[in-house]
Image (cartoon, rainbow, N blue to C red):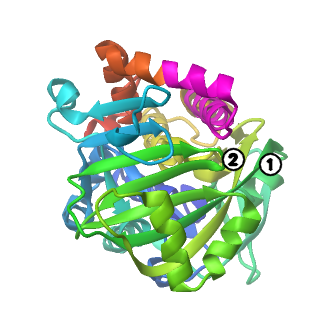
Amino acid sequence: MDADVIIAGAGMAGATLALGLARSGLKPILVDPQPFDAQQAPDFDGRASAIAYSSFRQWRALGLAGDLELYAERICEILVTDGRTPGPSAAAPASGFLRFDAAEIADRSEGEPLGYMIENRRIRAALAAAVRHEGVEVLAPSRVTGVDFAPGAAAVRLDDGRVLTAPLAVGAEGRVSTVAAAAGIRSAGWTYRQTGVVATVALDQPHGGVAHEYFLPSGPFAILPLTGQRSSLVWTEPPARAQALRAARPEAFHAHLQRRFGDLLGRPRLVGEVFTYPLALQLPERITAPRAALLGDAAHGVHPVAGQGLNLGLKDAAALVQVLVEAVRLGEDIGSEVVLDRYARWRNVDNVGLAVAADAFVRLFSNDNPVLRAVRGLGLSTVNRIGPARRFFMQEAGGAVGDLPRLLRGEAP
């Protein structure tokens, strides 16, 4: 065999998996069509990600904390508003308002914040440095064109004619997965009539580590704290309007932004480019097959309303690392259906449950129906008044609920 595991896709979830496996004594190979260094460029991925504190513990356990903490902004508070403008001022009697405060669960989270906001390019750079330091073989640019599955091995074909063999092939290459297609895994889902407009803005006033999310008929508008008195915006609009915003002159974009932003934190100023990403839900019929496993967006493409897409992929990586490491210690075949079924059973409920919940949340809030507005406003206000419910949702968002893999507890696998 050329490796223990061949991973198609060297994105954040795939690289985390490779690093966890290498740190545990297995030999992974990463394959990606993009040059590894290109993924760290500011114009490659303009997004920032909300990282659950359990996901950040995994990176600490893998030695990434030193490279990430300088760029990680602590999310100390989250304010959710069903109103026309963000923040407590919007909590009129007809509006719903919900506040999450990290101090409420400090005794259970060991003083961690609700999460961390980190620009994706910073995460990619830290993972790339760690992967190289660990000696993981990275084939990039190189594309997986197909996989042949046999009883004893997966034979991965590359676009340069090479064929690599391993007991297991992992599809971590996004929603269009060559590994999934080769394994006969079909997906179902739908597109939303929404596009995410992503931009970074500088602020006149400190954000205080507070994340804002408020809801408009077109979809959610999130203002997420970054280091250096900046915020990342995730602005959901219909596709045509989103493309118009991306192409708008800076002064026109700022005028639209100011209307959405309101008086919160002064006048925002655009920093860098404006990016757009189509929004859709996609779930495969299963996440494993003989000699194949899926993780990250290949295993679940969800709406970003709850900020959990990458965290689901990092949970996948932690679970798969632990399953494979334990199988090796027991002398089992890591590509066997018996071993991979443990991974599938561990992750299926969480992946499907969060995708369904995010979809329901978007449908409930992305409209201006007065009856639904009253119902959701009542729901937000009720949860806001019930301490145990608030604390449960905070722990769930932090990834601290359920049977956690050791890496998510900050332990070696």
Name the N-terminal-most of marks 1 and 2. 1
Q: Quadrant of the C terminus?
A: top left
Q: Is residue 123 above or below residue 52?
A: below
- Mark 1 touching mark 2, by CB under 8 A? yes
Residue type (three-letter) at the residue carrying disc 1: Ala
Up the image or down, 185 lies above or below 326; here it is below
- Separation of residues labelled 1 and 2 (CA atoms): 7 Å
Please name the residue shown 55% across and 59% down the image. Answer: 235
Q: Is residue 346 visible?
A: yes
Question: Looking at the picture, how far across and down is residue 12, in whole percent?
Answer: 47, 61
Say which residue appears at 57% left-offset and 32% top-offset: 354
The local secondary structure at tag 1 comes to: loop
**99 in the magenta segment:** no
Q: Is residue 111 left or right of residue 365?
A: left
Judging from the image, what secondary structure is the residue with disc 2 in? strand
The amino acid type of the residue labelled 2 equals Ala
Q: Nearer the viewer, residue 147 or 78?
A: 78
The residue identified by callout 1 is: 183
Which one is in front, 231 or 125? 231
Residue 301 image position (x, y, % from top left): 66, 48
In the rendered image, which quarter is residue 141 located in?
bottom right
